[in-house]
């Protein structure tokens, strides 16, 4: 019996819970069909849900047929509870997307679709309420194909028509269908599993029309995933039962889980910004529960593919991976409104904060914040519907009647250009200095952290500690004190003292380096944007367009179908949050507004917002911008704009050059916005002017006939098209996908492909070695290139011919930090390199090292760079020379740095002692 975990997703009021009732009824799990409006739906188990007629919390139900056991996860449909929905997606095998046949595809439906695409979940679509007057099958199917996917296919069509529509969704499937005239069930199942086709069904869940056929096809065209034998589990929800027991909901993704099994945390934890990294833990599973609706059964052991609730675990959190399972990426959806929680006078705010933290653990859409300066509790929410729900939850759980203050927008900050930040912390008997490169990142990428510091300069343990301090804190911008986002922070260099440095010293130096860099940077204030769909009577469309223009929003030309007009576009949350009331007013209740969070974009009235917030970054004692230095046995504070006059290290970065070569993602957006604010003071240093140049590199050849070769090529094939973008680091954390206003240019990885034998026979020393032992020459070349890659950090691929070796299959072997390729039989290194360049040359910065003239012409035509064998040799020699010089400079500068700030009197005394010792000898 195959075992599946399936999610039910929909826009609010699409009939999702009603469909689940029908499916459970057909499967024999319930004897009577419940109704949401009657308050007796099987999965609406909370009183709040019964009162409001909406799903607030995700629940599960188990349906069994002869050949299938499905755990249905019913998720909230209201946009305000989207975070509750998103966290269930990480454990789904399939999803059922329910669409209201009267409304069609709404803005929130598009958000759901993008999330399903991000998590790569196969989707079955059920178009509900088709029994209502005004629904149009063909119109809805066309809308699905236009707005979701052209591969949305009606699976209740005639067999021949269905097979034809299925076949055209995939090239191989089409070839098979044209040859045989048939398709197997397995063929269709594979297409669905790989998201190459999306089955659509039309019916009415309330009247049980089309539900039986849907369930039959769902059983027919699904398959159970393959699970490993090693234990793994994904935590997706934390809750508490009526007795207050903490429940950890998880899906077993490998092996099995038994009662009394000891589970433990991973050594490497993925922590959200602002949260502290937890200590390692080991805890025992007391009880394993299988819930179906409000009831549960206990099990002594559950196998892979099971969704269960476990008691006894107190340290788990949503998104955590246990055993062999990896942790989840950061969620896409996040709160955009901030409210102060107003407590009764006799309520202890500190005790209430702990209670709310417990609630925050269970409800991912809540972000509880403590303002220590004001002694206030704030909460970040997705929307205003949550306020009433949260009030009821707090009263039900803690018996405290709270109110909410006026809501504010949750802003964020980023930067426009690269900047170097320096932090120094040196009170008496403490020492740490940190230099960070802060660069703009892609929209939606969050904060990413890297290191480019040599372990010869700063030991690995100190570097790891600095990266940990960067990750553990939610860094605040300097415009409004809003969270920093969409930046890449790279550790450039640092210094520790063998005796006086402690871990807390680097925490202080790291925090101060970030703040000092932000003070020097050109900051951009970001605000959240809605993607909206506004439906109004045709006579009101002029008013609607005028309103959106006043909001400085954007919209597409309106769509009209007689009496109704539809306007789709984007607008700032701050402008549109209360617009629903206006729509109801001027349309006499006939208009409808659907909004979903699109992402963050530059604030158009930045100066006005910054002035109204009134944040003073230099008065923020918890986030200091200056550094602490030491002189005459005492520490003293140096303001941020003077830190570089006192710092002990130089990084050798030319910030002007970096700024010229960097991409400003937000400045490239279509929307206009206020100019970035320069945070430097009048009369204070602009920062970064005393740094040295050290930006990215590019390969260059040394042929004397380079211009002639290029001229011959251009006369034959036309101008050479090359990407001359600057060198970019390889990102270590894949950025979370986000909805952007315009797709920016992707950052390029750098590749170096080396023709192995061509290089060996071109380098004199390797050629001589090859005459005695070709294998020794190959090993020597691999060692040379491995050392070179360690400095340059590009992806290096060394290719050797194996085309004369009979029956040899292509091999790609890692050798330390490079890749070594041995071509297959009948394929030369030239052919392999040409094939690879053709595949990756247009999207990446590719350089080929060879002295084969014909091969050079071909690779230039693919947009790649080339370097000769001798040019590569010189490049390697220069790199090694520079590395040695830098290492010697570092050693020289690190020998006496403790004496750099010694008083003249003390230095004179030290000199007398030294001379006295020499005289004594």
Image: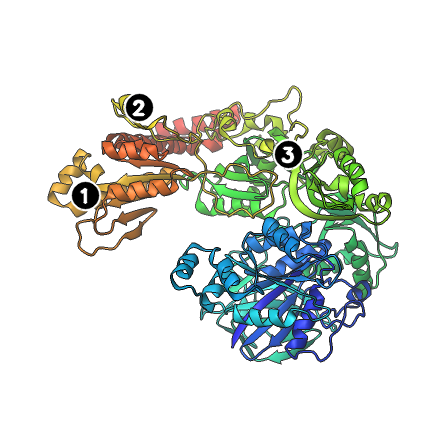
Q: Which residue is mark 1?
A: 777
Q: Nearer the viewer, residue 886 or 63?
A: 63
Please give the residue where the numbered disc 3 appears in the rendered image.
625
Q: Nearer the viewer, mark 1 or mark 3?
A: 1
Specify few, some or many for label 1: CA neighbours under 10 Å numbering under 14, 14-19, or 20 or more: many
Mark 1 near mark 2, Cβ–Cβ under 8 Å? no
Question: Which residue is located at x 20 percent, y 56 percent?
Answer: 807
Residue 488: image quadrant is: top right
Name the side, left or right, on which 360 lies relative to 189: right
How far apart marks 1 and 3 lie (CA) works out to 55 Å
According to the picture, the residue beneath numbered tag 2 turns out to be 715
Task: Name the colour scheme.
Answer: rainbow
Indicate the secondary structure of the residue bearing disc 1.
helix
Residue shown at the point (52%, 62%) measured from the top left:
162
**Left or right relative to 132: residue 783:** left
Mark 1 or mark 3: name the one nearer the start of the chain: 3
How far across and down, in percent of the image, does residue 279 sit?
Answer: 57, 59
């Amino acid at each position: 019996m195959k075992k599946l975990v399936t999610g039910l997703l929909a826009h609010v009021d699409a009939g999702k819970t009603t469909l689940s009732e029908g499916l459970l009824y057909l499967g024999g799990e319930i004897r009577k069909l419940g109704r949401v409006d009657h308050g007796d739906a099987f999965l609406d188990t909370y009183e709040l849900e019964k009162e409001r007629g909406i799903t607030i919390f995700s629940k599960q139900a188990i349906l069994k047929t002869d050949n299938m056991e499905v755990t249905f996860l019913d998720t909230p449909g209201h946009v305000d509870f989207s975070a509750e929905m998103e966290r269930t997606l990480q454990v789904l095998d399939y999803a059922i997307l329910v669409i209201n046949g009267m409304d069609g595809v709404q803005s929130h439906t598009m958000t759901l679709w993008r999330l399903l695409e991000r998590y790569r979940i196969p989707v079955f679509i059920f178009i509900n309420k088709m029994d209502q007057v005004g629904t149009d099958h063909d119109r809805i199917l066309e809308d699905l194909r236009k707005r979701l996917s052209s591969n949305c296919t009606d699976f209740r069509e005639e067999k021949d028509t269905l097979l034809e529509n299925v076949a055209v969704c995939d090239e191989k499937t089409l070839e098979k269908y044209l040859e045989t005239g048939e398709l197997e069930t397995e063929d269709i199942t594979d297409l669905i599993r790989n998201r190459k086709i999306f089955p659509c069904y039309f019916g009415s869940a309330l009247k049980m029309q089309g539900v039986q056929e849907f369930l039959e096809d769902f059983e027919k065209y699904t398959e159970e995933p393959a699970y490993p034998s090693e234990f793994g589990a994904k935590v997706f929800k934390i809750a508490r039962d009526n007795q207050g027991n903490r429940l950890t909901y998880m899906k077993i993704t490998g092996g099995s889980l038994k009662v009394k099994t000891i589970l433990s945390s991973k050594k490497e934890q993925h922590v959200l910004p602002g949260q502290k990294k937890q200590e390692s833990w080991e805890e025992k599973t007391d009880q394993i529960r299988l819930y179906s609706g409000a009831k549960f059964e206990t099990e002594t052991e559950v196998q892979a593919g099971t969704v269960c609730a476990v008691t006894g675990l107190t340290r788990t959190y949503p998104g955590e991976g246990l055993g062999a399972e990896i942790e989840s990426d950061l969620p896409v959806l996040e709160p955009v409104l901030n409210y102060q929680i107003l407590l009764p006078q006799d309520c202890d705010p500190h005790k209430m904060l702990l209670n709310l933290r417990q609630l925050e653990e269970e409800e991912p859409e809540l972000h509880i914040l403590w303002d220590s300066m004001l002694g206030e509790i704030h909460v970040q929410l997705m929307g205003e519907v949550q306020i009433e729900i949260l009030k009821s939850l707090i009263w039900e759980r803690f018996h405290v009647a709270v109110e909410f203050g006026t809501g504010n927008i949750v802003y964020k900050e980023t930067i426009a250009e690269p900047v170097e930040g320096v932090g120094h912390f040196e009170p008496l008997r403490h020492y740490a200095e940190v230099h960070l490169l802060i660069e703009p990142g892609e929209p939606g990428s969050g904060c990413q952290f890297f290191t480019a510091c040599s372990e010869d300069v700063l030991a690995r343990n100190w570097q790891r500690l600095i990266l940990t301090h960067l990750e553990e804190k939610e860094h605040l911008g300097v415009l409004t004190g809003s969270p920093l986002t969409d930046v890449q922070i790279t550790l450039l260099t640092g210094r520790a003292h063998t005796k006086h440095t402690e871990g807390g010293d680097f925490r202080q130096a790291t925090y101060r380096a970030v703040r000092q860099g932000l003070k020097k940077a050109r900051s951009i204030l970001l605000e959240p944007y809605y993607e909206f769909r506004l439906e109004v009577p045709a006579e009101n469309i002029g008013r609607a367009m005028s309103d959106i223009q006043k909001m400085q929003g954007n919209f597409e030309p309106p769509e009209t179908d007689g009496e109704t007009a539809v306007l789709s576009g984007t607008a700032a949350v701050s402008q549109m949050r209360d617009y629903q009331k206006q729509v109801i007013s001027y349309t006499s209740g006939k208009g409808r507004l659907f909004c979903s969070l699109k992402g963050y974009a530059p604030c158009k009235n930045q100066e006005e917002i910054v002035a109204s917030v009134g944040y003073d970054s230099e008065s923020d004692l918890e986030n200091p911008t200056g550094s602490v230095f030491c002189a005459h046995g005492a520490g003293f504070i140096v303001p941020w704009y003077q830190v570089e006059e006192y710092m002990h290290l130089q990084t050798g970065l030319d910030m002007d050059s970096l700024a010229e070569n960097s991409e400003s993602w937000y400045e490239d957006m279509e929307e206009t916005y206020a100019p970035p604010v320069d945070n430097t003071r009048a009369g204070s240093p602009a920062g970064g002017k005393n740094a040295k140049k050290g930006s990215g590199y590019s390969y260059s050849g040394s042929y004397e006939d380079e211009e002639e070769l290029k001229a011959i090529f251009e006369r034959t094939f036309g101008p050479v098209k090359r990407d001359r973008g600057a060198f970019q680091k390889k990102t270590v954390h894949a950025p979370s996908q986000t909805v952007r206003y315009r797709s920016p240019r992707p950052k390029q990885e750098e590749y170096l492909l080396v023709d192995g034998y061509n290089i060996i026979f071109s380098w004199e020393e390797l050629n001589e070695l090859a005459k005695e032992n070709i294998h020794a020459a190959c090993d020597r070349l691999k060692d040379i290139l491995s050392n070179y890659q360690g400095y340059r950090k590009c992806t290096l691929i060394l290719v050797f011919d194996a085309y004369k070796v009979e029956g040899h299959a292509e091999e790609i072997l890692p050798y330390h930090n490079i890749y070594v390729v041995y071509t297959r039989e009948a394929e030369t290194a030239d052919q392999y390199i040409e094939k690879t360049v053709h595949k990756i040359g247009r999207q990446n910065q590719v350089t080929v090292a060879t002295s084969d003239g014909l091969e050079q012409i071909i690779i230039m035509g693919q947009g790649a760079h080339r370097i000769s064998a001798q040019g590569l040799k010189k490049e390697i020699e220069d790199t090694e020379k520079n590395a040695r010089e830098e290492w010697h400079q570092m050693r020289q500068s690190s020998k006496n740095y403790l004496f750099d700030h010694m008083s003249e009197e003390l230095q004179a005394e030290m000199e007398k002692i030294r001379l006295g010792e020499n005289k004594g000898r």
